[in-house]
Amino acid sequence: MLNDSLIAVKRKLQQNLQNRYSLDDDIVVLNQLVEQDGSVPQKNKNKMVITLLNLSQETTKQYINSNKKQLDSTFIKTNPALTFNLYVLFTACFDDYEETLKFLNSTIAFFQANQSVSLSSSQTGTEQFNTLRFEIENASHHEMHNLWSAMGAKYRPSILYKVRYVTIQSGELQKIVPQVDGTDVKAAV
C-alpha cells in the first residue's frame, strides 16, 4: 500500500503540473535523491522528485474489527489493519533555479488546494480505499540540514509533508467464524 499510495499521489501531482504548464513529458518521479554510490540519479534531472523519508505508526486512529461476511453466511476474521504516517519530501531538481521555484510553488499550491487525496481501489490495486491527508511538516533549518546530511545529498529547495492514514492490511485469514442464527438461551432456575 505504501508504493500504491505514493504512485497514486505522483500521478495526481503529475496530471496537475502537466495541465498547468501544458507539458507532454513526465515531470514528477518517485525516486531516491542519492544513489548508493553518492551520485545523483539521472532520472531526477529537471523533475519534481517524491522521496519517502520515514514512516511512523498512527496510534490515535481507531482500529475496527476486520470481520467480513462471506456468501455462505460465515465471517472471515483478519488482524486489524495498520495505519501509518509517511514523511514525504517533495524536491525540485531543476537546472534552472527559476524553474525550481516555479515547480516547488506549484507543488505547494496543489497540496494547499488538495489537502486530502482520495484513492480508490482501482488506483491502489487493492480492495482498500484510503483518504490520504497532507500536512506540512515544519522542520527547523537545523533539522533540514541534518536530514540532507544524513541522505548524503546537497540541499535542493524542497518541502516536507506528513501524509496521514496510509493503511496496510495483509488480508490473511485468521479464522472462519460462523454466523449467529438466533438465541437458544435456557433459563436458569
Image: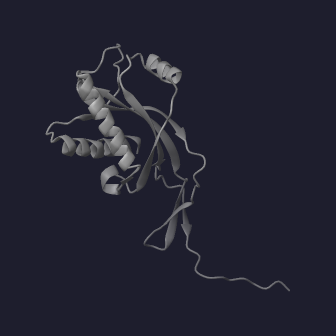
Marks counted in the figure total 0
Q: Where is residue 162 in the image (x, y as percent from the top left)?
A: 47, 39
Direction right: furthest residue: 189
Can residue 44 be seen in the rendering of this structure? Answer: no
Question: Against 111, is 173 above or below?
Answer: below
For the C terminus, the image quarter is bottom right
Q: Which residue is at a point 32% across and 36% down the rendered structure image?
A: 105
Q: Position of residue 168 (x, y in %)?
A: 47, 47
105 vs 172, nearest the viewer: 105
Question: Against 15, is 121 above or below?
Answer: below
Can residue 39 be seen in the rendering of this structure? Answer: yes
Q: Which residue is at a point 72% across and 82% down the rendered structure image?
A: 185
Question: Against 108, is 184 above or below?
Answer: below
Q: Which residue is at a point 79% across and 85% down the rendered structure image?
A: 187
Q: Where is residue 158 in the image (x, y as percent from the top left)?
A: 38, 29
Residue 122 location, quadrant: bottom left
Q: Where is residue 140 in the image (x, y as percent from the top left)?
A: 52, 26
Q: Which residue is at a point 57% across and 60% down the rendered structure image?
A: 65
In the figure, is residue 67 to the left or right of 101? right
